[in-house]
Amino acid sequence: MKAVQYRTVGAAPEVVDIPEPTPGPGQILLKVTAAGVCHSDIAVMSWPAEGFPYQLPLTLGHEGVGTVAALGDGAEGFSVGDAVAVYGPWGCGTCVNCAEGRENYCLRAADLGINPPGLGNPGAMAEYMIVDDARHLTPIGDLDPVKTVSLTDAGLTPYHAIKRSLPKLRPGATAVVIGTGGLGHVAIQLLRAMTAVRVIALDVSEEKLALARTVGAHETVISDAQAAARVRELTGGVGAEVVLDFVGVEPTVKTAGAVASIDSDVTIVGIGGGLLPVGFGVLPFSTSVTAPYWGTRRELAEVIELAHAGSVDVHVETYSIDEAPLAYERLHAGKINGRAVILPNG
């Protein structure tokens, strides 16, 4: 079967032929319908050889949907042909966090060497993939798999971030979304569906800000050195009660801190490596700064329900599996408006 693999540190991903996997006890084989392309993959492929955490070659793709093709011995809960989405942040399944469905915060995954598909384990960017346990699958019913696949990360991650700040997202409050690409343009839709706040979106291009307005942003601001002042002006000098940074580089986290109001939440989702100093007098009083990771199993089911209700619609560009390296090139160059999706089986 064809697969997209990262094979050599520092090199571009390649389309290769590898054997079709066979499910072991408790495992499920999926025929992959769609796989998402994410900036996290580019971050992984930029890490140096020294201390690189995963074995190569690595089949990419931590966003996946497909249909059940075969069940390993003892696997239950699904039937061949079921349409499902893959929950990505696999955990041990037995620690206190996993017992609550919070496998994104598994206490033992690192010690046990448990990795997500596409981020250590073979991922969804292949014609077929193995899912380790039925609990890591969520039914999607009649949803369009191409529109649904990115909800497993680009939907789940902002949903998780927004839920923790719901007490501050009251009517009349302001939420700032920094970065309106794959995750950010979904975050805007989630904020509009889940709250009555005013949404101000920041990005570096008018094209991406146009998408932000299309999906519901009330105001848009070019993300530059004057962005913080502009947001302050739009909020009457008060700032935003919730700031969601989906980029996470030094300039954006600086902007995030600069637009935060008193008793606000600043959530750094992007993995750009930017640092926001925290201390008395550094940020407005009682500002909370957090860097969450992905989302819970229950939250993925909730995001899928929002999709069924028509409350979220991911803007996608589709590519064949042979075009996957091109999709990564375009993503790295900032030319993807929304989310790139690979169709491994056509």
Image (tube, rainbow, N blue to C red):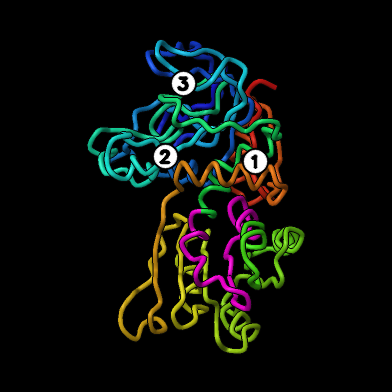
Judging by the rendered image, the residue that carries numbered circle 2 is: 89
Picture quarter containing residue 120? top left
Disc 3, SS = strand
Residue 296, image x, y percentages: 44, 45
Give residue 130's mark.
3
Q: Is residue 292 above or below residue 308?
A: below
Residue in front for this viewpoint, 295 or 269:
295
98 shown above or below 273: above
Q: Position of residue 238 (x, y in %)?
A: 55, 86
Question: Which residue occupies 42% across, 30% down?
Answer: 8
Q: Quick one: 268 or 69, which is closer to the camera?
A: 69
Q: Quadrant of the N terminus?
A: top right
**Which span is picked out in magenta?**
160-188
Which mark sits nearer the N-terminus, 3 or 2? 2
C-alpha distance separating marks 2 and 1: 20 Å
Helix, strand or loop at mark 1: strand
Tag 2–tag 1 contact (CB < 8 Å) = no
141 versus 279 height, above or below: above
Percent across and percent down for residue 346 are 70, 22
Q: Residues within 10 Å of mark 1 (few under 14, many from 20)?
A: many
Which amino acid, by three-letter code, is at mark 3? Ile
Identify the disc placed on residue 317.
Answer: none
Residue type at mark 2 is: Pro
Residue occupying the far left of the picture: 111
Q: Nearer the viewer, mark 2 or mark 1?
A: 2
Per the image, the residue denoted by label 1 is: 340
Q: Residue at x 50, y 30 (%)?
A: 137
Q: Amino acid at mark 1?
A: Ala
